[in-house]
Image (cartoon, rainbow, N blue to C red):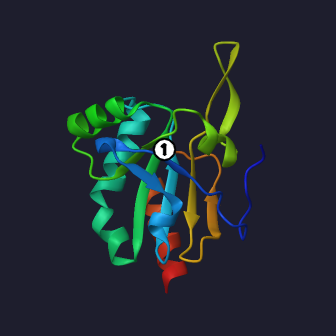
Amino acid sequence: MTQPAIGDTAPDFTMPRDGGETVSLSDFTGKYLVLYFYPKDNTPGCTTEGKEFTAHKSDFAALNAEIVGVSRDSVKKHDNFIAKQELNIILGADLEGKVTEDYGVWVEKSMYGKTYMGIQRATFLIGPDGKIAHIWPKVRVKGHVAEVLETLTAHAA
């Protein structure tokens, strides 16, 4: 599945989330949604990214934005990740892989000469109208949250 483009209607989703509830795209109608995809709970880059989004949650909220992180980890792993790292953001559990595939972030990766399928770290800014306002296709964690906040500020102005 190819990645949606800026201006496209964001692919709809409903998936389990931390705390045992569900999270859906429709929960954020009329708000901005920062939907970020990350490979795995409790790994260094993913922990840094989650902590930075948590640290700036009030800055995003002030701009009418919510944050949802998505990986293929289970709800139980998400709950442990949130407790261990003191995160305060929603984490969606894409157990069947539909959301990562719909957003085009389930890709072939390689490490030490072996290829495997995994989540490409990517972030989508979805506008209050449900359309994709901005995409960061291959995220480097350092400075990423500040960049998302800066872009959101420009869109929300």
**Mark 1: secondary structure:** strand
Q: Which residue is mark 1?
A: 70
| Depicted 54 relative to depicted 33: above or below | above
Looking at the rendered structure, the kind of residue marked 1 is Val
Looking at the image, which residue is at 31% across and 62% down?
57
Residue 141: x percent and y percent?
Answer: 47, 45
Q: Quadrant of residue 48?
A: top left
| Side of 34 where 75 appears, left or right | left
Picture mark count: 1
| Depicted 108 relative to depicted 46: above or below | above
Looking at the image, which residue is at 60% across and 35% down?
97
Pick the residue in front: 82 or 18: 18
Residue 140: x percent and y percent?
Answer: 53, 45
| Side of 50 where 114 appears, left or right | right
Looking at the image, which residue is at 73% across and 56% down?
4
Please tell me how crowded label 1 is: few (under 14), some (14-19), or many (20+) other residues with Cα within 10 Å.
many
| Side of 5 where 76 appears, left or right | left
Q: Outermost residue, top direction?
A: 113
Q: Outermost residue, right direction?
A: 2
| Depicted 90 relative to depicted 33: above or below | above
Residue 32: x percent and y percent?
Answer: 49, 71
| Depicted 29 relative to depicted 136: above or below | below
Looking at the image, which residue is at 71% across and 66% down?
6
